[in-house]
Image: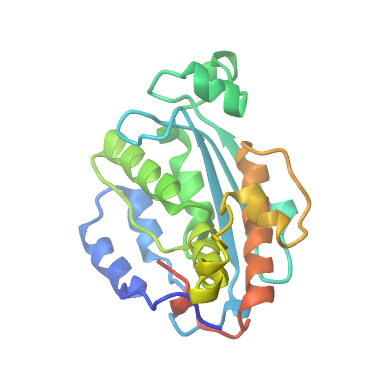
Amino acid sequence: MKLLKTPTIDWPSKFAQRLLLAQHPALKSFYQQTLPNADTPMDEIEFIALDFETTGLDPKKDDIITIGLVPFTLNRVFINRAKHWTVRPRKQLKEESVVIHGITHNDVLDAPDLSEIIEEVLEAIQGHILVVHYRRIEREFLDRALRTRFDEGIEFPVVDTMQIETAIQAKWAGGFWNRLKGIKPQSVRLGKSRLRYNLPAYTPHHALTDAIATAELLQAQIAYHYDTKQAVRDFWL
């Protein structure tokens, strides 16, 4: 089953180009790492699920406050290798975001700036395809954060479980008769999507918990709707 159009980005070539332009040592190291080939079957890849909690939703006005990641394959989530960081944002914490994720000023007061841990973060994700739920957050926030601190952004391939679920729901609700019956695509929020695969409900808005939840969601999506031997080129963006 194939619900996504094949993206046109050749990520290994993109990384080779970015390596020639990179200035910061951590970014040079990041782009030097070999990515899986576009033809690699999904079940042969070790992914990393990544999630951020932020001060808001606008990367131009907001900043990262926590980072969670966990390596996984289609058969296993490696909890013992999971990582979580709290960082001190350069933007003010907003009351509405504190209510959502529960991270207060006291929690970030003594936390390091992202620049102090970025080498550790990039080392953890380099050479991997990242899996996220709504790629705009992780892509745009990390790119903006690095531009703010180092005058240099970052690009990386992602598999977006929200994008996959959107395509699945569009197919499920598509067709003349479904429209006639008023059937509409269901919510593609992380928690709602997980429920459709009988995955357990986790407390949301914790970066590491949401990373684990995203990893499990991709496992379920592939198991239910795709061939595990399907090439990663059909999924990465």
Rendered position, 194 above or below 13: above
The front one of 224 and 81 is 224
Q: Quadrant of the C terminus?
A: bottom left
Rendered position, 119 above or below 89: below
Rendered position, 155 above or below 206: below
Q: Quadrant of the N terminus?
A: bottom right
Horizontal arrangement in the rendering, residue 222 relative to residue 10 (left or right): right
The residue located at (43%, 71%) in the rendering is 34
Question: What colouring method underlies this structural image?
Answer: rainbow
The front one of 174 and 35 is 174
The extreme front residue here reads: 180
Could you tell me residue 225's position as x and y percent? 63, 76
Horizontal arrangement in the rendering, residue 165 relative to residue 143 (left or right): right
Instruction: For residue 59, say whether it is visible.
Output: yes
Picture quarter containing residue 12? bottom left
The residue located at (65%, 50%) in the rendering is 192
The front one of 37 and 165 is 165
Instruction: For residue 175, say whether it is visible.
Output: no
Could you tell me residue 134's position as x and y percent? 47, 52
Rendered position, 15 above or below 188: below
Could you tell me residue 227's position as x and y percent? 62, 84
Horizontal arrangement in the rendering, residue 145 relative to residue 216 (left or right): left
Picture quarter containing residue 110? top right
Could you tell me residue 86's position as x and y percent? 56, 31
The front one of 225 and 109 is 225
